[in-house]
């Protein structure tokens, strides 16, 4: 879906009205003028805040070397929140980030009513938000870079059109990062070939077949060295049938 199409579908569905429809050109132009990764992250965060009519938000980048998501850009948060959520485990299937990576989005309508989030309700209350949405930053080739989240002061459910527009903007940012890295020769040829080869998005992974699993992000391709099978709620090793705790982004036949 093109970014302009996504914004057009938001017309009449967002408090900003026609202003949100005029946003595509602004952010596409701004993205094209970004000179480094940080400016791209700042641009996608500002765009998603405008799209969802929020004033609090952050971008977390995936570091596959330690399996963590780390805050790389933020708006509106104080030190307690930034320290508490500075680094989270990307492999945690029960976390908001884990849900966003697995389902390609996560929406929490009310932090105070979600029992799984009870441990950090006091931090959320002091930070001034009751609800949030998180969307993965994924390129057109399927490379995963991180997650962009926006937060709301009251219980709130973003519309489907708003979520789709956020997803399109996140995709635009991921593609901009890939292009920047290629321009600056930061992507090895082997990684470029792998990313553009026969890897498929993990959401389309079949059951009852031996698969090769991988995480593809700005560090390149990190594939498991043993065949896996998809099972309800996760993955298992094909040979031993042992369940494994992984959060792959892509698959291909073994």
Image: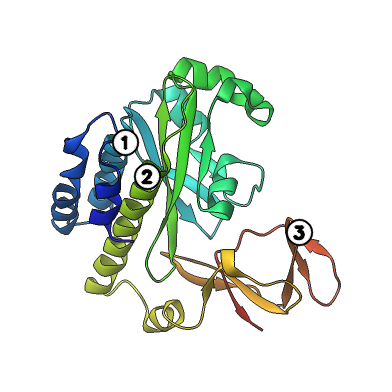
Residue 167 lies, in percent from the top left, at 38, 51
* 165 with respect to 16 (left or right): right
Q: Residue at x 55, y 71 (%)?
A: 222
Residue 64 lies, in percent from the top left, at 53, 60
Task: State the residue position of label 1.
Answer: 13
Q: Distance between the residues labelled 2 and 1?
A: 8 Å
How crowded is the residue under tag 3: few (<14 C-alpha within 10 Å), some, or many (20+)? Answer: few
Above or below — where is 20 with respect to 232?
above
Labels 2, 3: front one: 2
Residue at disc 1, secondary structure: loop
Above or below — where is 147 with respect to 231?
above
Above or below — where is 188 with respect to 165?
below
Residue at disc 2, secondary structure: helix
- Quarter of the picture holding the C terminus: bottom right
Q: How far apart are marks 1 and 3 (CA)?
A: 36 Å
Q: Which residue is drawn at 58% across and 70% down?
A: 214
**Is any atom of residue 67 visible in this view?**
no
Task: State the residue position of label 2.
Answer: 161
Residue in front for this viewpoint, 160 or 89: 160
The mark total stands at 3
Residue 140 lies, in percent from the top left, at 37, 68
- Asked if disc 2 and disc 1 are in contact, CB closer than 8 Å, the reply is yes
- Quarter of the picture holding the N terminus: bottom left
* 84 with respect to 233 (left or right): left
Residue 55 lies, in percent from the top left, at 31, 27
Task: State the residue position of label 3.
Answer: 232
* 134 with respect to 111 (left or right): left
Labels 1, 3: front one: 1
């Amino acid at each position: 879906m093109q970014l302009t199409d996504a914004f057009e579908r938001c017309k009449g569905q967002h408090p900003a009205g026609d202003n949100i429809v005029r946003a595509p050109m602004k952010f596409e132009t701004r993205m094209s003028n970004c000179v480094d990764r940080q400016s791209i992250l700042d641009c996608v965060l500002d765009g998603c805040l405008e799209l969802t009519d929020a004033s609090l938000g952050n971008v977390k980048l995936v570091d596959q070397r330690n399996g963590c998501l780390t805050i790389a850009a933020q708006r509106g948060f104080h030190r307690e929140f930034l320290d508490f959520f500075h680094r989270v485990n990307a492999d945690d299937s029960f976390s908001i980030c884990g849900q966003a990576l697995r389902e390609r989005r996560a929406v929490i309508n009310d932090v105070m009513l979600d029992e799984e989030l009870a441990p950090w309700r006091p931090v959320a209350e002091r930070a001034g938000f009751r609800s949030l949405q998180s969307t993965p930053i994924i390129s057109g080739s399927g490379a995963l870079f991180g997650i962009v989240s926006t937060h709301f002061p009251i219980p709130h459910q973003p519309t489907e059109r708003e979520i789709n527009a956020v997803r399109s903007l996140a995709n635009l940012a991921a593609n901009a990062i890939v292009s920047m890295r290629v321009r600056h020769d930061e992507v090895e040829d082997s990684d470029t070939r792998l990313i553009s080869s026969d890897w498929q998005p993990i959401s389309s992974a079949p059951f009852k077949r031996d698969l090769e699993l991988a995480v593809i992000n700005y560090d390149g391709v990190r594939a498991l060295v043993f065949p896996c099978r998809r099972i309800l709620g996760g993955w298992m090793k094909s040979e031993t049938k042992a369940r494994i705790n992984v959060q792959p982004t892509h698959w291909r036949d073994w």
